[in-house]
Image (cartoon, rainbow, N blue to C red):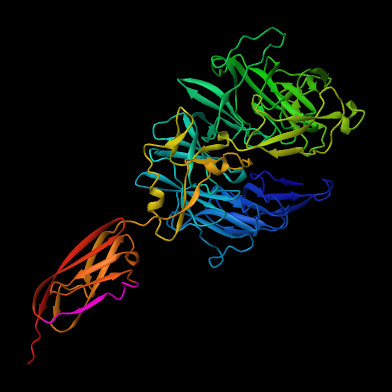
Amino acid sequence: IMLLTDPEIESSLLISSDEGATYQKYRLNFYIHSLLFHPKQEDWILAYSQDQKLFSSVEFGRRWLLLHEGVAPNRFYWSMMGSSREPDLVHLEAKTVDGHAQYITCKMQNCSEATRSKPFPGYIDHNSLIVQDDYVFVQLTSGGRPHYYVSYRRNTFAQMKLPKYSLPKDMHVISTDENQVFAAVQEWNQNDTYNLYISDTRGVYFTLALENVKSSQGLEGNVMIDLYEVAGIKGMFLANKKIDNQVKTFITYNKGRDWSLLQAPDTDLRGNPVHCLLPYCSLHLHLKVSDNPYTSGNIASRDTAPSIIVASGNIGTELSDDDISMFVSSDAGNTWRQIFEEEHSVLYLDQGGVLVAMKHTSLPIRHLWLSFDEGRSWSKYSFTSLPLFVDGVLGEPGEETLIMTVFGHFSHRSEWQLVKVDYKSIFDRRCAEEDYRPWQLHSQGEACIMGAKRIYRKRKSEKKCMQGKYAGAMTSEPCVCTEADFDCDYGYERHSNGQCLPAFWYNPSSLSKDCSLGQSYLNSTGYRKVVSNNCTDGVRERYTAKPQQCPGKAPQGLRIITSDGKLTAEQGHNVTFLVQLEEGDLQRSLIQVDFGDGIAVSYANLSSTEDGIKHIYQNVGIFRVTVLVENSLGSDNAVLYLHVTCMYVH
């Protein structure tokens, strides 16, 4: 356990390694602003001081080493890649002496000038370094416009490519799961919305996934985007999109390729029918996630309880802040049930086998609600004899937990009260194999999602037993590839007939222009498979980009010059002409040179033009030297006038 002292009194750490029975005190010569623990090594910590210095400790804070000064707030990271070869590498953004920002990496025990490296050449914009999974992002503003760069698997940086018409003024990286970047981009003409883009594996080429997603300012001026990644089911997101000044909630199961509205419940809490027809009326959810660990946000899902989503929202034509109810889905967003008419905090215990709900209220309460059947029925329990003003609720970490702690106070003058609630006594047995049933993930009946059929193990809702450790998804089998498994490739847009055709700003032949003969490039079919989609066969072959030989080019930009650059030469001496070509390949062309004195030569497949073409003029005068280069695609010519003088012998 580590405790930080109040910096206004002193700067120390109190450390206990016997579950809090005894504490050792360690004085610090700096004031801690924030701590970043290593994800794997429990004794490794980075500390950021109030005067922008970064310190490291390999002894759980008992000893500290100054790594770097002038580090940007929250712009320091542990290097965590899929196969992190250097777990002790730290990435940070630091100020140079003259106030520029730089991206630096160094070892946590040694960050001297000699050992640190600068993976991005030159300076970057202040507060722009992001290191996440296999990706590193930086921003560089030039000409008044931000340019975004990405490095995949710590390779060299490449500029991120959005569609040509996009003029971004802000970008946020939303997710870097499964070798793909999900980014929110604010265009020059957007104020309270962002567009969602999704990338190829390297994070370079971005295509549009959803336009006009609602955004808002957080308390600290941070931007919050109304997009929620559902835990436990890869590729599933909810987003609030603005359409004609109305905000509506949409769901995707395939990482943004297809979006649909949410089907409202058939009945309300009292069992009365709800008349709500898609697309005119649907269910809308608030997608704010809480930064505070003691309070739940508007929406919750857990990795260990795939398929269960609890959220607050309303039924109607658009999302509203009035008339908020609580809803639950136990089939991954296909159908929803109303569970409360007011806002509640909901906690997941025992992998969603128990849901605990507490009312959001400024009044003191003594009851909470429990559900053992994924929110279908709720029973009321009292957890305190005196009514308590509830400040927050915390579920214990770990998957087997059935314990939650309620923080609160009995009156405005009293100390904090902690009420520990243990639900073990409710269960009389652990779950056995026959208490489970297979459950197939689907999207409105379609079982092939992201190219696979996924079957999860779910506890039968009528069985009241304790689950314990999470066993994970049961099985997954690939589906045959169909058109639905493919997105439009960079530069292509989906037309009303469903085909991906080149966008107005994109020239498909531009890919082959950037390569030279003898190499190959990937010739896009206009489609790209949704990254991490696992489908096989079917239309896969037809839609996958094919490597093609780079085509030759017609000769263009031909020049002829003398090797010394002069336009004069002496009679009887060697003159060397150099032939240069901007586009095309001299080695695979026919070259004809007419020296203008009645002599002409021609070369086929000239092996080396570096040595130039030599000629001796026997006479004096002005000669017109012409060169012609041609191949099967076209030809080009160039002219040079050479003044040949005679040599005087004294």
**Residue 274 makes an appearance in the image:** yes
Q: Which is the main secondary structure of the residues drawn in magenta?
A: loop
Q: Quadrant of the C terminus?
A: bottom left
Front-most of 118 and 488? Answer: 488
Front-most of 245 and 584? Answer: 584
169 to 384, vertically: above or below: below
28 to 641, vertically: above or below: above
Name the residue located 25 percent from the left edge and 62 percent from the top edge. Answer: 558
Left or right: 120, with 288 as reference point: left
Left or right: 517, with 419 as reference point: left
Residue 506 position, x and y percent, is 38, 41
Per the rendered image, the range of residues in magenta is 607-618
Residue 65 falls in image quadrant: bottom right
Residue 204 position, x and y percent, is 49, 47
Farthest residue toward the bottom?
650
Residue 8 position, x and y percent, is 64, 44
Name the residue located 73 percent from the left edge and 52 percent from the top edge. Answer: 42
137 to 649, vertically: above or below: above
Name the residue located 17 percent from the left edge and 73 percent from the top edge. Answer: 566
Is 174 magenta? The answer is no
Residue 311 falls in image quadrant: top right
Front-most of 22 and 269? Answer: 269
Left or right: 282, with 296 as reference point: left
Name the residue located 74 percent from the left edge and 28 percent from the top edge. Answer: 347
